[in-house]
């Protein structure tokens, strides 16, 4: 039985691929490959439980500093994932939305992403967000630049700037804020992921290494979320009345 209080938007920091590989005496890239399998399981579980938005932290702005072999292997995995999964996204009517500095990704990846985003853009029931070359601080800088340009062009009055207007300049402009952020592998950091959008999100720290993440652990996270009381700064009494 799925829990009754289902989050609309779940965002996941997928961590532990390298440790999973090490534990199994395998190269790191095999951990990432198994991580891509976990992505497919998670996408299915999210849709089955009625989560409308699932956003995955697949590659951060900081990840470029990993060894070149590993970065190349991750891009290769992503390329294959997009190729394999596009028919699945179409079949299951899932819109793909990329958040991050798109234009700095390799050309072949940009082309695949554009193709998948264009092919799925009209689906409005389920969204898969992929955070690629993403970092919250970079996102805020990009938003500030975009706001400055709009002000210069005269389409935005700075004295009327409020958070609702500000959020329209974030990469996530057409997505609801995450209700639940999951981080796997027992780490308890937000690592520059959706920091503004997660202002009121509940956080679930899973001990499971990402390649081993499955439907049962997804359900554990949903169950923990359902038991929480979200107060948005109010007192418990105010919520009752
Ligand atoms: C963290 O594990 C994971 C990443 C840096 C990348 C996430 C990538 C995937 C799950 C696979 C590909 C994704 C898609 C969408 C096809 P880590 O390497 O930091 O693990 P460690 O902390 O144990 O070393």
Image: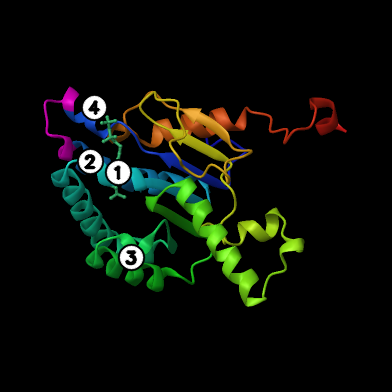
Q: Position of residue 61 (x, y in %)?
A: 35, 48
Q: Earlier in the sequence, mark 3 or mark 1?
A: 1
State the residue in front, 127 or 4: 127
Specify few, some or many for label 2: CA neighbours under 10 Å numbering under 14, 14-19, or 20 or more: few
Q: Can residue 30 be seen in this view?
A: yes
Residue in the picture at 88% in, 33% down: 241
Q: Is mark 4 within 8 Å of ligand 1?
A: yes
Q: Where, by quadrant of the figure, is residue 230 drawn?
A: top right
Q: In this view, does 100 lie above or below 201?
A: below
Q: Earlier in the sequence, mark 2 or mark 4?
A: 4
Q: Earlier in the sequence, mark 4 or mark 3?
A: 4
Q: Does the residue labelled 2 lie within 8 Å of ligand 1?
A: yes
Q: In this view, does 114 lie above or below 43?
A: below
The reply to whether callout 2 and callout 4 are in contact (CB within 8 Å) is: no
- Badge 2 marks a residue whose secondary structure is loop
- Badge 1 marks a residue whose secondary structure is helix
Q: How far apart are marks 3 and 1 (CA)?
A: 19 Å
Specify few, some or many for label 3: CA neighbours under 10 Å numbering under 14, 14-19, or 20 or more: many
State the residue in front, 125 or 113: 113
Q: Name the residue under label 1.
A: 63
The quadrant of the picture showing ligand 1 is: top left
Q: Where is residue 120 in the image (x, y as percent from the top left)?
A: 42, 69
Q: Is residue 170 visible?
A: no
Q: What stretch is highlighted in magenta?
A: 22-30
The reply to whether callout 4 and callout 1 are in contact (CB within 8 Å) is: no
Please check the rendered image and state whether residue 26 is part of the magenta-colored stretch, yes or no.
yes
Q: How far apart are marks 4 and 1 (CA)?
A: 16 Å
Specify few, some or many for label 4: CA neighbours under 10 Å numbering under 14, 14-19, or 20 or more: some
Q: Is mark 1 within 8 Å of ligand 1?
A: yes
Q: Which numbered marker is on residue 90?
A: none
Q: Where is residue 136 in the image (x, y as percent from the top left)?
A: 48, 46
Residue in the picture at 36% in, 38% down: 14
């Amino acid at each position: 039985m799925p829990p009754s209080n289902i989050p609309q938007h779940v965002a996941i920091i997928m961590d532990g691929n390298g440790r999973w590989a090490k534990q199994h005496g395998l190269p790191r890239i095999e951990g990432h490959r198994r991580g891509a399998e976990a992505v497919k399981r998670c996408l299915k579980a999210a849709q089955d439980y009625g989560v409308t938005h699932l956003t995955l932290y697949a590659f951060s702005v900081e990840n470029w500093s990993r060894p070149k072999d590993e970065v190349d292997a991750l891009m290769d995995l992503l390329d294959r994932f997009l190729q394999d999964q596009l028919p699945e996204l179409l079949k299951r009517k899932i819109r793909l939305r990329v958040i991050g500095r798109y234009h700095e990704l390799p050309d072949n990846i940009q082309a695949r992403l554009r193709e998948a985003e264009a092919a799925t853009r009209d689906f409005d029931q389920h969204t898969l967000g992929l955070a690629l070359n993403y970092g919250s601080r970079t996102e805020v800088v990009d938003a500030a630049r975009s706001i400055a340009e709009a002000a210069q062009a005269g389409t935005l009055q700075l004295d009327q700037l409020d958070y609702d207007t500000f959020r329209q300049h974030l990469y996530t402009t057409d997505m609801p804020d995450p209700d639940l952020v999951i981080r796997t592998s027992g780490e308890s950091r937000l690592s520059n992921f959706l920091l503004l959008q997660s202002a009121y999100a509940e956080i679930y720290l899973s001990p499971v290494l990402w390649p081993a993440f499955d439907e049962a652990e997804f359900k554990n996270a949903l169950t923990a979320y359902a038991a929480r009381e979200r107060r948005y700064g109010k007192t418990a009494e105010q919520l009752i009345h």
